[in-house]
Image (cartoon, rainbow, N blue to C red):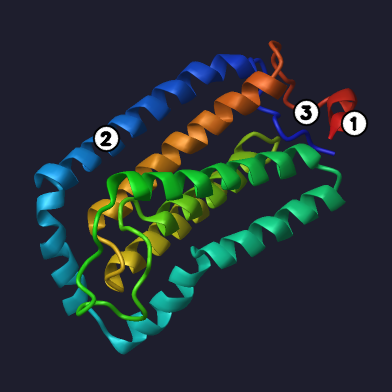
Amino acid sequence: MQHALSVPQSVPLRDLRPRFVLAATAAIVVFAWLAVATKLGLFPAIHDSTVTLWAVNLRHELLTAAAWPITHLGGTLSLTLLTIAVCAWFLWRKRWRRAVVLAGAMAGSALLTVLLKISFARSRPSSVLLLGSPASSWSFPSGHSFNTGVFVGVLAGFVLFSATPPARKALAVVIACTAAVAVGLTRVYLAYHWFTDVLAGWSIALAWLCLVAVVVLTVWGRSRALPAQPSRALAAQE
């Protein structure tokens, strides 16, 4: 059985933590700038209305039909059910660490979503432009973008930190990015969010994923490098 935290030969897992901290810091800086921009009307928030109107003008029945199932995949109910299903599958495969990481990451992102929305209390686009029923929560950041990014990011991370061939790792990253981007763009298309909200959701998702990675590497990474093929002892711990 592959170990959840295997990496290429001679790369100490703990040596990766500074890189994740740096990435998280950069993502938080971006998020902070977006938050300031929404309050002061600076770039890119100053163009939010223009982007929303542009998205509304692009509407077509085929695009709308595709946007709804995509946006629902990033909703609270869908992500909750998907998280439960995937965690159950991990537990059935006796990969309890992966179940713990995914469940913890998603629970944390859900809580952060609520706290951040309350903290910034940004209004959503006009309901006149909205396709669908009005949302009851605040707009900044986009919870769909944030939580979808965390969900697919964690799953992609499991692939990256495994002995999977490079081509499959690249494919996992592409699929994860495509899913996160698709969900985020539907939020603008359906006029549930400003584009800045979506950018903020993506940036805080990256920051949260990096912080989760730091915690995982600290708790389970050990100080030694893992071999290219996981040892039986490490595999047994899964």
| Front in this rendered view, residue 118 or 149 | 118
Left or right: 201 in relation to 129: right
Task: Read off the residue under disc 3.
Answer: 229
Residue 171 seen in render: no
Which image quarter is the N terminus in? top right
Q: Name the mark nearer the viewer: 3 or 2.
A: 2
| Front in this rendered view, residue 164 or 52 | 52
Task: Read off the residue under disc 2.
Answer: 32
Q: Name the mark nearer the viewer: 1 or 2.
A: 2
Left or right: 5 in relation to 93: left
In space, the residues marked 1 and 2 are separated at their CA atoms by 42 Å
Q: Position of residue 114 (x, y in %)?
A: 44, 50
Task: Read off the residue under disc 1.
Answer: 236
Identified at 40% across, 63% down, the residue is 182
Which amino acid type corresponds to the residue marked 1 in the rendered image? Ala
Left or right: 93 in relation to 42: right
Element on which disc 1 rests: helix
Element on which disc 3 rests: loop
- Between disc 3 and disc 2, whose residue precedes? 2
Q: Residues within 10 Å of mark 2 (few under 14, many from 20)?
A: some
- Between disc 1 and disc 2, whose residue precedes? 2
Residue 146 seen in render: yes
| Residue 150 against residue 135 in the figure, above or below | above
Left or right: 54 in relation to 116: left
Q: Name the mark nearer the viewer: 3 or 1.
A: 1
In space, the residues marked 3 and 2 are separated at their CA atoms by 41 Å
Residue found farthest to the top = 223
Which amino acid type corresponds to the residue marked 2 in the rendered image? Ala
